[in-house]
Amino acid sequence: MKLSGAQAIVKALELEGVEVVFGYPGAAICPFYDALMESNIKHILTRHEQGAAHAASGYARTTGRVGVCVATSGPGATNLITGIADAYMDSTPLVAITGQVNSELIGRDVFQEADITGATDPFCKHNYLVKNAKDLPRVLKEAFYIASTGRPGPVLIDVPIDVQTKEINFDYPENVDIKGYKPNLKGHSLQIKKIAQAIEKAQRPIICAGGGVINSNAAGELFELSKKCGIPVVMTLMGIGAVPYDYDLNLGMLGTYGVYTANYAVNNADLLIIIGARVADRAISNPQQIAKKKQIVHIDIDPAEIGKNIDVTIPVVGDVKQVLKELVDISQKGNTEDWIKAIQTEKAKRELKPDSKPGTGFVNPKYVLSVLTGLLGENDIVTTEVGQNQIWAANYFGVKKPRTFISSGGLGTMGYGLPASVGAKIGCPDRRVVCIGGDGSFQMNMQELGTIKQNKLGIKIVLFNNSRLGMVRELQKTKYCGRYFQVFLEDNPDFIKLFDAYGFKGRRIDDNSQVEDALKEMLSDEEPFLLECRIDPEESTL
């Protein structure tokens, strides 16, 4: 089959089962766009390349499929960088395709040239600069394989214009064989037996569930292990949804911005079972101190993560789902009754109860999220921006199922939530999608309202407006003696008028007594809606 390089890329995407790509055209990627016109693949034109990368991420994290984003050379490609880095930190399967100047011009600093493979090398699983059009079928096959297997992550393919226009004999490989890349899926059975023995002997075990549980679709196995062996569960930000929020052994999110009971349990456990988590600083601030006081089990698909941040007693490299299946079969419950009682006592004493008192002139964001929990179904999706809004959502919104809470974890990317909600809605059109944001982070990528309008996406946005960069302001209050500087957003636009300009409905509330009625109005139809909540600038993150 004779195809141009651009046609070969499109054909490869079709053969990989890609149904949608997110992108923004430009001269160096025009041959690809011309070929894409003849395909049934849907293209979503975002209003910024960063929006395309985040939308592809939201799509990938809600559907479990590889997200695809496309941009032109130079500034188009560099605008993808934040989204690629975000996907790398959060182990999101992504394939980014960028145009590049003609091969003979590379390295001459010509118009819209940037070394995007060099720029993204530190935070890509792999990247390619394709110099020979004949390599395109192999490269595309490898890219999707690398992005989706082992520990998922982003792969970038940079394609010069002349490579896109060169004609080749298209022959798509059936299999991939990459020397040095052989992800180990099956955990070592002897090590898994050691975990089972440790569980039976432990009196104060705790499971820490990370994003790897979500990525490997292992929530069912995790729940079964916890229930069978009476082991409470704490979650990292990326692990939220691994067990239902109302499960009696779910202790919530741990870490700097986590809940007291989760941190209490981790500190007082005699066995900590870390599953699909990186042991990042925001989750466990002093890992070596923790490791001195207990046995540490670490199960992860990525061998580089095991022992990187914490000393491990029993390491297991393998796919979380496969390892947990084997572990559930052979594990027996230890004597954990006293431990569970102690934890439940602490949990009851420290129960999160948001203030619902009316007449304050402000809306309590924690109360909004607790009410929203009761109004959304188990399959509805919540995305968040980054900042106070993110932590409030993590701690006060009750997530019922995996892949329904989408937030930027490792990179903490402001501006992530709105474009991620676009990808989530495109990937799951029959499910409600609600984006939780703050006035600061929302304005990072609010141009994606145009994408929502063009594609008629009924996304709901709950905007917590305190006219501040709330988390930075709080940091300046607690760490810098209240020396506030460059954290005031008191000249914010009228967000309701902004939404009206796009033809969207909206409502502004400033009292807790209005919350339930306003949320019900927001959710009453399938149209885009902004619910702006005026909140107290002094409202704390925790």
Image: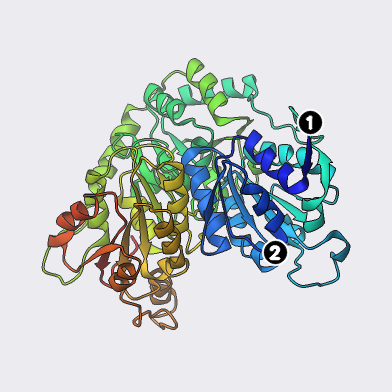
Determine whether, in the image, residue 534 is placed left or right of residue 255.
Answer: left
Residue type at mark 2 is Ala
Q: List the residue tagged with mark 2.
A: 27
Q: Is residue 317 visible?
A: yes
Q: Position of residue 416 (x, y in %)?
A: 48, 59
Q: Position of residue 288 (x, y in %)?
A: 58, 49
Q: Which of the colour schemes (rainbow, by chain, secondary structure, one colour) is used?
A: rainbow
The image quadrant that residue 470 belongs to is: bottom left
- Crowding near the residue tagged with mark 2, few <14, some 14–19, many ≥20 C-alpha atoms within 10 Å: some
Indicate the quadrant containing the C terminus: top left, top right, bottom left or bottom right: bottom left
Q: Position of residue 200 (x, y in %)?
A: 46, 22
Indicate the quadrant containing the N terminus: top left, top right, bottom left or bottom right: top right
| Between 330 and 164, the one nearer to me in the picture | 164
Determine whether, in the image, residue 137 is placed left or right of residue 222.
Answer: right
Determine whether, in the image, residue 93 is placed left or right of residue 364.
Answer: right
| Between 156 and 353, the one nearer to me in the picture | 156
- The secondary structure type at the circle numbered 1 is loop
Q: Residue at (67%, 43%) from the top-left corner? A: 10
Residue type at mark 1 is Asp
| Between 186 and 123, the one nearer to me in the picture | 123
Q: Residue at (31%, 37%) from the top-left corner? A: 378
Q: Nearer the viewer, mark 1 or mark 2?
A: 2
Q: List the residue tagged with mark 1.
A: 177
Q: Residue at (40%, 82%) from the top-left corner? A: 484
The image quadrant that residue 452 belongs to is: bottom left
* Dots 1, 2 in contact, CB < 8 A: no
- The secondary structure type at the circle numbered 2 is helix
Position of residue 488 relative to residue 37, above or below, is: below
Q: Position of residue 172 (x, y in %)?
A: 75, 33
Which numbered disc flags the more N-terminal residue, 1 or 2?
A: 2
